[in-house]
Image (tube, rainbow, N blue to C red):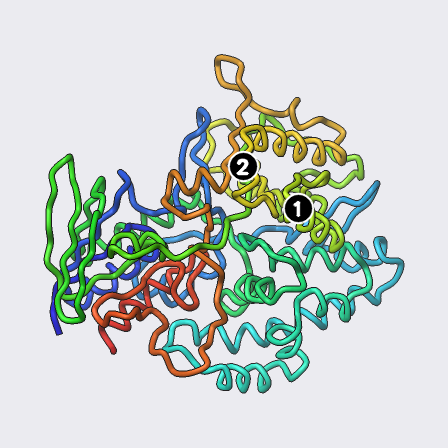
Amino acid sequence: MGNRVVIVGGGHNALVAAAYLARAGRSVLVLERLGHVGGAAVSASPFPGVRLSRYSYLVSLLPDRIVHDLGLRLDLRTRSVSSYTPVDQGGLLVGGPDTAGSFRALTGSHAEYDRWREFYGAITLMAKALAPTLLEPVLTRESVRDLVLAAAGERTWRQVFEQSLGETLEETFTNDIVRGVVATDGLIGTYTSLYDLRANRCFLYHVIGNGTGDWRVPVGGMGSVTAELDRAARRSGARITTNAEVTAIEADGITAEVRYVVAGEERTVAADHVLSGVAPAILDRLRGRTPADAAPGAQLKINLLLDRLPRFKSGVSPEDAFAGTLHLDESFADLENAYRATEAGALPDHPPAETYCHTLTDRSIVDSPTAHTLTLFGLHTPAALFADPGARDELVSRYLARLNHHLVDPIEDCLAHFPDGRPCLEARTPLDLEADLSMPHGNIFHGDLTWPFAERPVGWGVETDTPNLLNCGSSALRGGGVSGIAGHNAAMALLNP
């Protein structure tokens, strides 16, 4: 087996692969187009005195095993509250000391909370059984089914893998708000109806991380995660070249060659293996092939810097409301209505979104002792909507209006400002992700998520049609999210074919 490995793209998965391979004695060169590594797992300073997670912002799927293997010095903190959904003068607060009471106040009885606990109890049993398999050769569908049946029973298998998430929520819960809170995990970065199994696949990955599904806050922002991966790769002996734009990849199953440009100079490097951390359409172009079509990205991310947190009309403390995920217009009906509206080419009147405040868990990313960051992640905003140059501003206006509907203090009154008077607010559309990160149509997963199994044995789920060209990016089987799983599995496929 040859020793020379070139990794195209310097996202977090590529850094994980580089670290494992260099530790195993391979000669590893990482080529990154941008002036920094990390892909979407980066921090930036769009406003004075803050360094926030510009794109990805929470961590769940990164296995503790990878953290341990690579000696990553990460502080990932659990949020004090899971979620808050404002409803009229009340709402649903999940994860606080009186979750049961909040369910009772919303629904009128204990029954819905009992159903919630039963449902997530089974989901947790399933997650604990499946999470370790993500770092192993891909199992067949039948093997995964056997694991789920043994751990959580036939009903859980049917509800997660066979019938749509929409049907599952309708048969499990009676309250539309409760259904929506569960449903959002099936729509993050995934543009689809809740009656489509694509929502099931997205839901699965959002509840399976480390067997708990807990979404944790990276202290220092997402850039701290990338900094540790970069350190681990370099310490292991990997070479990382930034500002290196790859222009072509040739691989014949035995040898390979990668052409790239640095500072205007064209260079060529020979390799025994090439790992691709870029989206499939980009890889096709680099191989001289017609690019595969990509599913559209469908999220609008708004980053804000606040001088203070606003108060809520419901009386819930802003520290509770914003510490976890604040659900805006995310009832089951709201989510389906927004999807139907955007499918028809219209902007939804009440666009669904979730909001969270990083600084309630980690103050290290801001200089001011009173400032707070706020992240709003809008759903069902497909790339095609932004062909209209006014769509971004109109959607931002609608999101802020819907947030203000629940606030005593308008969010605009709480915004910090640049010295020239501009408000500290930035909005990133799928088109921005495509332009900044070469993610076709702004799809944060490089395409539709896949089930964590195959109908027939396929090795590690990173293989391509050429034996010495492997996929270490988010589009690999079981890829997607800030997990490092695709990078680990590509390295293992090379080291343990």
Identify the residue position indicated by label 1 in the image. 344
Q: Quadrant of residue 33?
A: top left
Q: Is label 1 in a helix, a strand or a loop?
A: loop
* Along the viewing direction, whichever of 334 and 77 lies nearer the viewer: 334
Please indicate whether residue 215 sits to the left or right of residue 110 in the image: left
x, y percent for residue 418: 49, 18
Q: Circle 1: is it few (<14), some (14-19), or many (20+) Cα within 10 Å?
A: few
Q: Which residue is mark 2?
A: 386
Q: Determine contact: label 1, label 2, CB under 8 Å.
A: no
Q: Residue at x 31, y 66 (%)?
A: 69
> In the displayed structure, would residue 414 be above or below residue 201?
above
Q: Position of residue 478 (x, y in %)?
A: 43, 67
Residue 486, position in %: x, y?
36, 64
Residue drawn at x 57%, y 43% is: 377
What amino acid does circle 2 point to? Phe
> Total number of numbered labels?
2
Give SS at disc 2. Answer: helix
Quarter of the picture holding the N terminus: bottom left
